[in-house]
Amino acid sequence: MEQTNVQAFELGTPAIVCRWRLCESMLPLENRLLRALGKRQIDGVPVSRKLLAWAKQHLEWTLRSGSSDYPEGTLMVVIDKNGQAVMTVGPYEPLQSTSLAALIDRASISGIEAHKTCVAPETLWIVKNDVLYASVEQGTFMSGVASLVADLARTLGIPMVYDSDLVEKLSHKQIAFDQVFLCSDEHGIVAADGYDTGMAHKFVGSYQTLLEKERKKKRTH
């Protein structure tokens, strides 16, 4: 795929790296992902409208051909501190572990990224007494997949609590829970081993249904 400013282009130190899962060379939740990209910041400055327009244009024009080798791969959008960007597609690498500890570690690392860019690409969610808890601060803009879960919860009338300290509480076993899952723009909705029942199972199923709808679109065109 192409990049901004092709002539004399040299990408500097990456400031933002987005990893988005592809499905049949299409990008599920494209609008949500682009909205979240627009909320990210570099040194306190939001991603420019010009860059967002570039990203949308290249998704429309080159994603299908650019992902022909990896139609079920991962699309990477890398933006440097000067606002220059590049898109590239590579193979999708599944999570090596979906244990509770592994998902906590991923959410913790993502939280550090959120302090720099204002959007966490991966967030941890728990279910406790039929209430959904999200590891984000209320009012914070969510990633594409996380916003899908929040909207589904509102539609289904599921009570939600925003808790920016949730990951730390889970790390120190300071909160009880029934189910746990990770929301990731790269891996989708992933339930932790042994905590994949009930509501967590339903959200995982909803995401898989979304992917299947994308594959059906591909087959009908």
Image (cartoon, grey):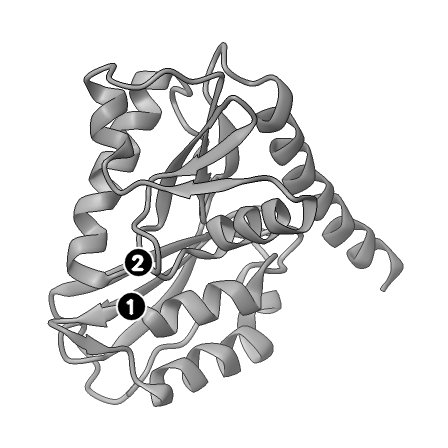
Between 25 and 188, the residue placed more toward the observer is: 188
Q: Residue at x 23, y 53 (%)?
A: 114
Q: Of the residues under marks 2 and 1, which one precedes in the sequence?
A: 1
Q: In this view, does 198 lie above or below 139?
A: above
Q: Which residue is drawn at 55% across and 46% down?
A: 149
Instruction: Say which amino acid is labelled 2.
Output: Val
Between 51 and 140, the residue placed more toward the observer is: 140
Q: In this view, does 135 lie above or below 1?
A: above
Q: In this view, does 135 lie to the left or right of 42?
A: right
The residue most toward the right is 220
Between 88 and 109, the residue placed more toward the observer is: 109
Question: Residue 86 is drawn in which quadrant?
Answer: bottom left
Question: Residue 65 is drawn in which quadrant?
Answer: bottom right
Name the disc covering residue 40, or none: 1
The quadrant the N terminus occupies is bottom left
Dot 1: what SS?
loop
Q: Residue at x 11, y 71 (%)?
A: 43
Relative image position of residue 148 (x, y in whole percent): 56, 52
Relative image position of residue 156 (x, y in whole percent): 69, 44
Give the CA separation, mark 2 to mark 1: 6 Å
Instruction: Say which amino acid is labelled 1.
Output: Arg
Per the image, the residue denoted by label 2 is 119
Relative image position of residue 46 (x, y in whole percent): 25, 78
The answer to whether the residues at label 2 and label 1 have Cβ atoms under 8 Å apart is yes
Q: Residue at x 63, y 60 (%)?
A: 26
